[in-house]
Image (cartoon, coloured by chain):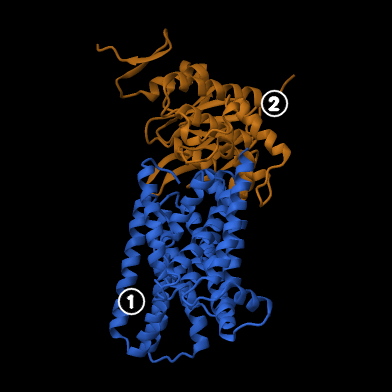
């Protein structure tokens, strides 16, 4: 039973950032399937930029991203859409747009030019809504939902896309604490149940430490990923909070203010 | 339930369209009895002048009204989705002004350079010039919107283009000799009724092509509704889609402006009327609904502008403004939160 680990996303000497500002320099790493990985780093460290680079929404400065062994630069938008589902920070708040009609376009890469859904597509949309616990909301208008509910719908849309990889850019940014936990636990469950590779950028480190399988830390042009225990063990939290008033209390597993000495 | 409501709405609008189409042919500054009109169309005995008015004047006008209404409102909906803004439209974003500028340079600028034009060349040249003008403004707006995501900037820019176009036209008018000026002024007063049968041979195929292209873009439009990032990661080729939408805009808004003059507020207001009626955001329903509503409203505007029984005719632009502006004000007041 020596099951080989699968790494759907691989960064190969990847550098990303902007012309005048390098964010990540020659990173070599991989994200594992069936795992929920949190991408952490300080403001402006390059979390969003990295996610957008993996999703091929922007070009790398050098190096490349491999999805299941293929360089994304050689893939069409549709091929990428068959592998990567993306939940961005864009707010979808359109009058009269039904929840079902937000999730249904997730099937776009699987349908023909008319975009008409087959019975299988409809099943996938319903399954996705059920997985995030929004099955009874299909006919509601997206504009009338709470932030937490809307975020679930956006995750359902990515699920309906039926991809091995889902990337999420700060999906819990505007949510209250119970909702943040709900979303993280949901993503963890989805990674395990559906064997998906889920990567989510976040500033909610304490929740990530309690719910994620692995933590990827962007720290000074470098990115390193390891299982959550190891991350804590090796002082990843201390590195993240270096030079701030915060520290991580290992006995209580919480982030707290440094005690003045 | 939901499907049923939409079917009833579509059916009612289609019947209304048919009724207004007939009314538009029957009503006019010269009153012709219904029996005469019927005879003119079926080839029966009737007064030759009645026949001429019915077939050569009122029928083209009614066809033009339907196509102009469909085209402008279709472009309006596409731009609102494309720019994710409820206040986008061909007139507001300066595309109609661009088309007008193209026409004015053609009708006023060329004579200034000493180029003489025959009636044939003028007929087709006006459309070509309108397309070029519309395409120019559309590409500038698209280029700016690719860099600046703030939609207010785009809207203000559109208004600036409109004013700039007007200013250039005024300069041209000032410099122009009387004969050229006359043909231009005739064009600006252009209404649905100025479209001749010969011009219909351009107007009909081009706008129908543009409308079909728009219908083919329903899936991309539904994806764009969620925003560029979502559309892109769902497999949409954003660049190609933008180009196709721009092409549809140029064909539809450019052609209609070339033949009917700049018509405001239809493109902006009609998609909102369709939204209020259908309560849908899915383009599969909203796009045909918008086209149908546009045709109905344009026919109604045309009938009103004829001021039946008075013998006077008002410019179509006046009527569309009077009908469109209250709708737009209602939209702004109703939706203080961002919606499309």
Residue placed at 49% from the left, 62% from the top?
A: B300
Q: Position of residue A68 (x, y in %)?
A: 65, 38
Image quarter of residue B115: bottom left
Mark in front: 2 vs 1 = 1
- The vertical placement of B319 against B179, above or below, is above
- The vertical placement of B166 against A261, above or below, is below
Residue placed at 53% from the left, 64% from the top?
A: B247
Image mark for residue B169: 1
Q: State the orange chain.
A: A
Q: Position of residue B219 (x, y in %)?
A: 60, 50
In the rendered structure, the answer to whether residue B77 lies left or right of residue B175 reads right
Pointer 2: what residue? A4
Spot the residue most to the right: A1
- Given residues B286 and A67, the one toward you in this image is B286
Asked which secondary structure carries label 2, the reply is loop
- The vertical placement of A259 against B315, above or below, is above
Q: Residues within 10 Å of mark 2 (few under 14, many from 20)?
A: few
Spot the residue most to the left: A261
> Looking at the image, can residue A63 be seen?
yes
- Given residues B129 and B293, the one toward you in this image is B293
Q: Residues within 10 Å of mark 1 (few under 14, many from 20)?
A: many
- The vertical placement of A250 against B324, above or below, is above
Host chain of mark 2: A
> Looking at the image, can residue A71 be seen?
no
In the rendered structure, the answer to whether residue B324 lies left or right of residue B16 reads left
Host chain of mark 1: B
Residues at discs 2 and 1 both on one chain: no
- Report how far apart the C-alphas of labels 2 and 1 lie in the structure: 72 Å
Image mark for residue A116: none
Q: State the blue chain.
A: B
């Amino acid at each position: 039973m020596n099951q080989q680990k699968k790494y759907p996303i691989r960064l190969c000497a990847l550098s990303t950032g902007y012309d005048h500002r390098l964010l990540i320099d020659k990173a070599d790493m991989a994200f594992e399937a069936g795992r929920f990985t949190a991408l952490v780093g300080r403001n402006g460290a390059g979390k969003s930029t990295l996610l957008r680079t993996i999703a091929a929404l922007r070009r790398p400065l050098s190096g490349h991203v491999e999805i299941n062994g293929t360089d994304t630069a050689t893939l069409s938008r549709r091929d990428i859409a068959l592998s990567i589902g993306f939940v961005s920070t864009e707010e979808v708040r359109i009058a009269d747009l039904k929840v079902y009609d937000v999730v249904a376009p997730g099937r776009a890469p699987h349908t023909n030019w008319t975009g008409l859904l087959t019975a299988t597509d409809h099943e996938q949309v319903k399954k996705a809504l059920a997985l995030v616990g929004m099955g009874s909301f299909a006919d509601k208008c997206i504009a009338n939902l709470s932030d937490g509910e809307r975020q679930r719908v956006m995750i359902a849309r990515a699920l309906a896309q039926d991809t091995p990889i889902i990337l999420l850019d700060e999906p819990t940014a505007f949510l209250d604490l119970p909702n943040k936990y709900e979303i993280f636990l949901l993503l963890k469950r989805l990674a395990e149940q559906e064997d998906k590779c889920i990567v989510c950028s976040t500033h909610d480190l304490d929740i990530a430490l309690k719910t994620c399988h692995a933590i990827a830390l962007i720290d000074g042009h470098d990115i390193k990923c390891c299982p959550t225990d190891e991350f804590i063990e090796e002082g990843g939290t201390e590195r993240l909070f270096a030079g701030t008033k915060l520290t991580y209390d290992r006995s209580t597993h919480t982030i707290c203010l440094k005690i003045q000495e | 339930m939901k499907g049923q409501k939409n079917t009833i709405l579509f059916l009612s609008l289609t019947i209304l369209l048919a009724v207004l189409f007939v009314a538009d042919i029957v009503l006019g500054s010269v009153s012709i009895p219904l029996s005469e009109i019927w005879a003119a169309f079926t080839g029966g005995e009737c007064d030759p002048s009645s026949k001429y008015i019915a077939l050569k004047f009122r029928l083209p006008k009614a066809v033009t009204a339907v196509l102009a209404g469909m085209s402008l409102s279709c472009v309006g909906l596409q731009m609102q989705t494309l720019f994710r803004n409820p206040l986008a439209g061909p007139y507001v974003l300066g595309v109609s002004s661009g088309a007008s500028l193209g026409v004015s340079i053609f009708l006023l600028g060329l004579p200034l350079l000493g180029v003489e034009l025959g009636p044939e060349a003028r007929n087709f040249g006006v459309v070509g010039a309108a397309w070029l003008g519309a395409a120019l403004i559309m590409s500038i707006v698209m280029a700016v919107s690719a860099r600046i995501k703030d939609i207010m900037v785009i809207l203000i820019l559109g208004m600036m283009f409109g004013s700039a176009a007007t200013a250039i036209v005024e300069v041209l008018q000032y410099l122009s000799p009387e004969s050229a000026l006359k043909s231009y002024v005739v064009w600006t007063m252009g209404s649905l009724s100025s479209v001749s049968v010969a011009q219909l041979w351009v107007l009909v195929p081009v706008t129908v092509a543009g409308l079909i292209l728009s219908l083919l873009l329903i899936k991309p439009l539904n994806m764009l509704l969620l925003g560029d990032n979502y559309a892109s990661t769902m497999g949409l080729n954003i660049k190609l889609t933008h180009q196709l939408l721009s092409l549809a805009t140029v064909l539809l808004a450019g052609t209609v402006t070339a033949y009917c003059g700049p018509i405001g507020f239809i493109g902006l207001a009609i998609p909102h009327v369709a939204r209020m009626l259908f309560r849908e955001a899915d383009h599969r329903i909203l796009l045909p609904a918008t086209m149908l509503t546009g045709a109905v409203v344009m026919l109604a505007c045309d009938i009103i502008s004829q001021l039946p029984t008075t013998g006077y005719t008002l410019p179509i632009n006046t009527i569309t403004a009077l009908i469109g502006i209250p709708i737009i004000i209602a939209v702004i007041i109703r939706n203080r939160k961002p919606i499309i």
